[in-house]
Amino acid sequence: MVLHGPRWVDALVRLRNILVSPFGLKTSGEGAPAPHGLIGLFPVVSETPERLVAGFNDYHLDFRIVVELAGEATSREVTSTTLVRTHNLLGRTYLSLIMPFHKLVVRGMMGRIMEPAR
């Protein structure tokens, strides 16, 4: 889902990185090394066979994406949850600007999971 997302997502991430760098926000590949590795752009916080938690903390907000699997292999259910804690006006403004794009990105990525099954 995260590793092989739609190509237009990569373009949005590159644009985001250009737009936020003047504000001192983290960009892709920036920050402390990820002790548990990376999944796509995001440092892995924890991982089990049923749940992946990835994300990072920044000046303006803390971000986590949680992807969970439930059920048997033939009828597996995948849930994606985004958790955000804003710290200041910049974080709240950023979140309000990014939210419409975030919803499109998550829907696009979740839709790609279903493609092989169709």
Image (cartoon, grey):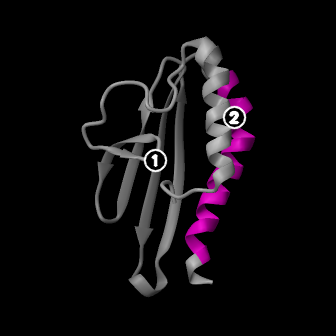
Q: Tell which circle, 2 or 1, labels the residue nearer the N-terminal end.
A: 1
State the residue in front, 72 or 41: 41
Q: CA distance from mark 2 to mark 1?
A: 18 Å
Q: Is residue 41 visible?
A: yes
Which dot marks residue 116?
A: none
Dot 1 amino acid type: Gly
Quadrant of the image occupied by residue 117 = bottom right
Which dot marks residue 40?
A: 1
Q: Is residue 1 left or right of residue 39?
A: right
Residue depicted at x 39% and y 24%: 31
Residue 49 lies, in percent from the top left, at 30, 65
Q: How many marks?
A: 2
Residue 56 lies, in percent from the top left, at 42, 32
- Farthest residue toward the left? 35
Quadrant of the image occupied by residue 90 = top right
Q: Which structural element holds mark 2?
A: helix
Q: Is residue 31 left or right of residue 109?
A: left
What range is drawn magenta here? 93-115
Q: Which structural element holds mark 1?
A: loop
Q: Is residue 92 visible?
A: no
* In magenta stretch: residue 54: no
Dot 2 amino acid type: Ile
Residue 107 lies, in percent from the top left, at 66, 58
Residue depicted at x 52% and y 41%: 83
Mark 2 lies on residue: 98
* In magenta stretch: residue 100: yes
State the residue in front, 44 or 15: 15
Residue depicted at x 60% and y 59%: 109
The C terminus, quarter of image = bottom right
Q: On screen, 69 above or below 60?
A: below
